[in-house]
Image (cartoon, rainbow, N blue to C red):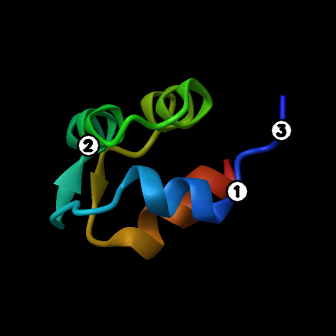
Amino acid sequence: MAELSPIDLQKALSGMDYPTDKQHLVERARKNKADDKVVSRLNGLKQDHFDGPNEVQKAVFNE
């Protein structure tokens, strides 16, 4: 399985409104038909509140 890329993450969260929480990130990714690896990575984040896409990206790629 290929590694998750920042582009995959951006596509999965397209149209997301911020600030948001982890559950809404997962719902948006599913709505955008994101790959299971993206959804599971978002679902596994320790952080629950995100002020913007940069914060999500840091949480996903630095955990």
Q: Which residue is mark 1?
A: 5
Query: What amino acid type should be assigned to the residue bearing mark 2?
Result: Arg
Residue toward you, 33 or 60: 33
In the picture of the structure, the residue carrying the numbered disc 3 is: 2
Give the vertical position of 63 relative to 14 (above or below).
Answer: above
Identity of the amino acid at label 3?
Ala
Which residue lies under the disc numbered 2? 28
Q: x, y percentage for residue 25? A: 30, 44
**Callout 1, which amino acid?**
Ser
Q: Image height check: is 18 above or below 38?
A: below
Q: Is residue 30 left or right of residue 37?
A: left
The x, y position of residue 37, in whole percent, is 61, 29
Q: Earlier in the sequence, mark 3 or mark 2?
A: 3
* Residues at marks 3 and 2, CA–CA distance in whole angstroms: 22 Å
The alpha-carbon separation of the residues under discs 1 and 2 comes to: 17 Å
Residue at figure coordinates x 41%, y 46% from the top left = 47
Q: Residues within 10 Å of mark 3 (few under 14, many from 20)?
A: few
Q: Quadrant of residue 51?
A: bottom left
Q: Position of residue 30 (x, y in %)?
A: 33, 31
* Image mark for residue 50: none
Give the position of the N terminus as an image quadrant.
Answer: top right
Helix, strand or loop for disc 2: helix
Q: Name the residue furthest front.
A: 33
Secondary structure of residue under mark 3: loop
Spatial CA distance of label 3 from label 1 is: 9 Å
Front residue of 44/25: it is: 25
